[in-house]
Image: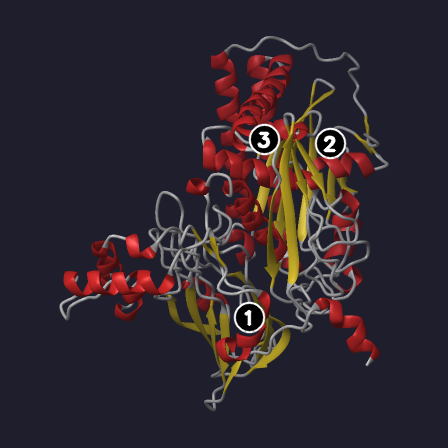
Amino acid sequence: MVAKIIETNPTPFQKVAIDPITLDIIENALRNARAEMDATLFRTAMSPGIREQGDAFPLIANNEGKMVVGQFGSFLGGFLKNYKGTIEEGDIIWLSDPYSVEGAISHLNDWLVIMPVFKDGKLVAWTCHFGHQTDVGGKVPGSLPTDATSIFQEGIRIPPVKLYRKGVLNEDLLELVLNNTRTRDWCRSDLNAIIASCRIAARRITELCGRFGTETFVSATGELLERNKRAMAQLIATSISEEKVSFEDYICDDGRGYGPYKLKATMWREGDKVILDWEGTSPQSESSINFYLNENMLKMFFGIYMIMVFDPQILFNDGFYDLVETRIPEGSLLKPKYPAALSCRTHGIGRVFDVLGALLGQRTPEFLNAAGFSSSPHLMLSGTYRGSGKYYQLFQIGFGGIPGRPFGDGPDGHSLWPNFTNVPNEFLEAYFPLRIERYETIPDSGGPGLHRGGNGVRIAYRFLEPGAIAIHDDRWFTYPWGVNGGEPGWRSRRVLIRADGTEKVLAAKIDDIQVRPGDLLIFDTWGGGGWGDPLARDPALVAGDVKRGLVTADGAKRYGVVLAADGSVDAAATDSLRDSLRTARGETGLFNFGGDIEELRERCVAETGLPAPVDPAMQESVRAA
């Protein structure tokens, strides 16, 4: 630890025994404090990305900086290792530069607040929270340029600095940063909300220390970490083989015409430790799709998947990190070298989940999930009202199909992140110059399977004022793959219909597309892959899906189900169709990717209306030509 903690009380903590009831009370009190952080933030923030969608992530860590409750793993390891200053009671640290904290946050829009919690002169815990800001400057509104080649083009970079020093606000620093945003009022409000959420958690921690004693509280946080490690050690020993398994998936393109970019991982166990080796991942992109994957975040992703699949009752925290070793090649898409651009990194985050799920499920296919809505597609809209000249700017995250799962269908129209919610259409229409003409799930977009993949979402935006849109999207070239005989889900698609009736299929990653009043954007997100043999799905379930508008009558035939005119199952025709489909298809595989990369290239224009991306390895030869 490089950061110097200033404590007025030098007495070291003594570890004390914790009875199970006290430990349980402290655990649930910390869970509630984390929930209170969210509630405080969402009720006081202004931007729709945080206020309505919940694009923010809190944590509470022990006095060593290890996450006890949270979601993404601790943000503190890289900060404590690299911060050269002192930390005292009343200090609040503020930062946004991923390179300063080893990728604990992944792009400049994420403003992270770190607050040490002192009791009687000693550091007892940390509270932290980061949230996505609508705009932090840079070359485009929204600060997420798809064509950026350097992080310097993406907005203001805030290194770890003291926003509050011993309880005193550095107003000049705050004004300097806000002067670099296009949405200063939202950013100020959101930052204050993040700080308030950290303070409320700090208050709950000091209350716990007062109730149970500081040494009891500190010992309890240590025991919660140890308990997690013991549980994870058991899961790893019983679920992870010493034999290596590998898997690779892709980010479709980089917004500059090159792709797909490979994410490859190999996993095995050595003794009680899991190795996650990302050798074979594509070199870093010249564009902004790089994802600086923090190693602790990767460990947490692994742990979350293990816990949710095998034992959801375990409190996931940082306790098990010693049991996971990560190897990420320097200069790769997941560990780019400074000052590589990072603003379009959202697709890498989600794809890591798909890869980890495929690795962990290969040995136990009954627990294997298909690929699903593994990203957070962004729509940005900005402009000025014709009458008043007032500026407006929207940042919105799209939802899609969750994959078919071992124990049921994937939800339709859901977020990659469980806590995210959609921006209500009423909010969009009240605060922005647009009208939502359609908001619906897309029938048949979920992959057929014994358990159906969730459907994607279609949103139709009618623009009422001149403006410009930007889009971050993926899974338009590769398919969300199915497993155990399940079929892939549909891919994403974006069509801009001008007021004069002309149509254009838009690329997945674009900036500064001008729109005029009357133009219509139809934004289709992708569906989840199916799980299991669709010909084994109960025909009555398929008929029910058709009745609810989730599957069409023609789509039911992909399950081998034929429906009568009244919507009931035609049993004889269904048996006949299923027999013929089984004969024609032959044996099913563990994964169904919808074709290999070269096959997808050949079919790309016909299937998507867009040219296939060029192999990234060809960039040098293209430049030379």
Q: Nearer the viewer, mark 3 or mark 1?
A: 1
Q: From the viewer's side, name the closer residue of 181 and 82.
A: 82
Q: Could you tell me which residue is drawn at 15 percent across and 71 percent down?
A: 565
The quarter of the displayed image where residue 274 is located: top right
Q: On the image, numbered disc 1 is attached to which residue?
A: 599
Outermost residue toward the left? Answer: 566
Give the label on residue 90, or none.
Answer: 2
Q: On the image, numbered disc 3 is attached to which residue?
A: 317
Amino acid type, label 2: Gly
Q: CA distance from mark 3 to mark 2?
A: 26 Å
Amino acid type, label 1: Glu
Query: Is 274 situated above or below 56?
Result: above
Q: Secondary structure at mark 1?
A: helix
Mark 3 vs 2, N-terminal side: 2
Mark 3 vs 1, N-terminal side: 3
Q: From the viewer's side, name the closer residue of 410 and 477.
A: 477
Q: Nearer the viewer, mark 1 or mark 2?
A: 1
Q: CA distance from mark 3 to mark 1?
A: 42 Å
Image quarter in which the C terminus is found = bottom right
